[in-house]
Amino acid sequence: MAYRAVLFDLFDTLVRFDRERLPAVELNGRVVRSTAGHLHPLLQALAPEVTLDAFHVALSQSWQEAERRRAIDHREVPAPERFAELFRCLGLDAAACPHAVMQSLLETHRRELSKAAEFPSHHGPLLADLARRYRLAVVSNFDYTPTALGILESAGVADLFTAVLVSDAVGWRKPAPAIYHEALRQLGVGPGEALFVGDRADIDVLGAHRVGMHAAWLNREGQALPPGVAPPRFEIRDLAELRGILAAEDRI
Ligand SMILES: [Mg+2]
């Protein structure tokens, strides 16, 4: 059956996220990859007693707490809430933090994380081709919408998508059905008319199946399918394989 829409995961599907491209910061003689070195100075005027080491620990703790909450019911914990948790970990009150300081923390974190996202050069022409025949969408689990939009814009592909859904704005994360349903609603297609493409079988593929959508699992490393996930309709090593898959489906 011919598809009318193709939906993509963002991180490690449309763009590769490479932690090694995060800023290097030296902590206790050890080099770690983290935005902490760029964020910590922004807090200095407000809380001069907070050391870089303590800041890095709190940044990690706030991430772990957000991940713990996300795992409970797939509700997103938006970045501002995560940063409020960071303040709590440091014994500070985020409500007392000037708006401009909080904004500069969020913006700096966004900017530095974006540098670690690499857009493969062959993805641009592929998406432009597909956009001529299909409605395209991005459905991303991420806690700050501007990061996702900025990455698509700097790759020059933002305009190719009919819809960009980020869990930060939707409230729900994949594999929760709500974010898939909202994407299909914005695309104006039914689940049987759409293909979901993503690198995580336990998230992207599982969630697509739950709403009755076909999935193409981007399995770059040739890993085994995790338990509890039904085999996807397609398994690919590179997005370039989508051309052949979609052309074949069009002929059926
Ligand atoms: Mg992914």
Image (cartoon, rainbow, N blue to C red):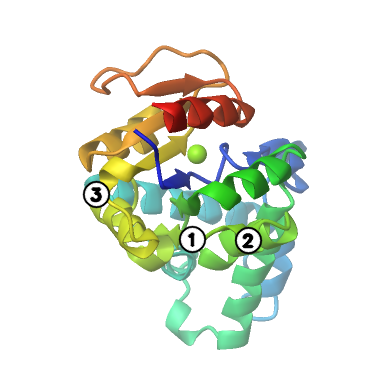
**Relative image position of residue 162 (x, y in whole percent):** 50, 62
Q: Which residue is pictured at 68% across the width and 37% down the height?
A: 18
- Distance from disc 3 to disc 1, alpha carbons, whole Å, reads 16 Å
Q: Which residue is mark 1?
A: 164
- Mark 3: amino acid: Pro
Q: Which residue is pictured at 67% across the width and 56% down the height?
A: 157
- Mark 1: amino acid: Val
Q: Which residue is mark 3?
A: 177
Q: Secondary structure at mark 2?
A: helix
Q: Quadrant of residue 118?
A: top right
Q: Earlier in the sequence, mark 3 or mark 1?
A: 1
From the viewer's perspective, tell me whether residue 144 is left or right of residue 71: right
Question: Tag 1: Cα neighbours inside 10 Å, few (<14), some, or many (≥20)?
Answer: many
Quadrant placement of the N terminus: top left
- Mark 2: amino acid: Ala
Q: Earlier in the sequence, mark 2 or mark 1?
A: 2
Along the line of sight, the residue nearer the viewer: 14 or 190: 190
| Relative to 237, residue 44 above or below | below
The disc at residue 158 is 2
Q: Are marks 3 and 1 in contact (CB under 8 Å)?
A: no
**Relative image position of residue 23 (x, y in whole percent):** 76, 48
Answer whether residue 35 is visible to the viewer in this image: no
Q: Quadrant of residue 93?
A: bottom left
Quadrant placement of the C terminus: top left
Question: Tag 3: Cα neighbours inside 10 Å, few (<14), some, or many (≥20)?
Answer: some
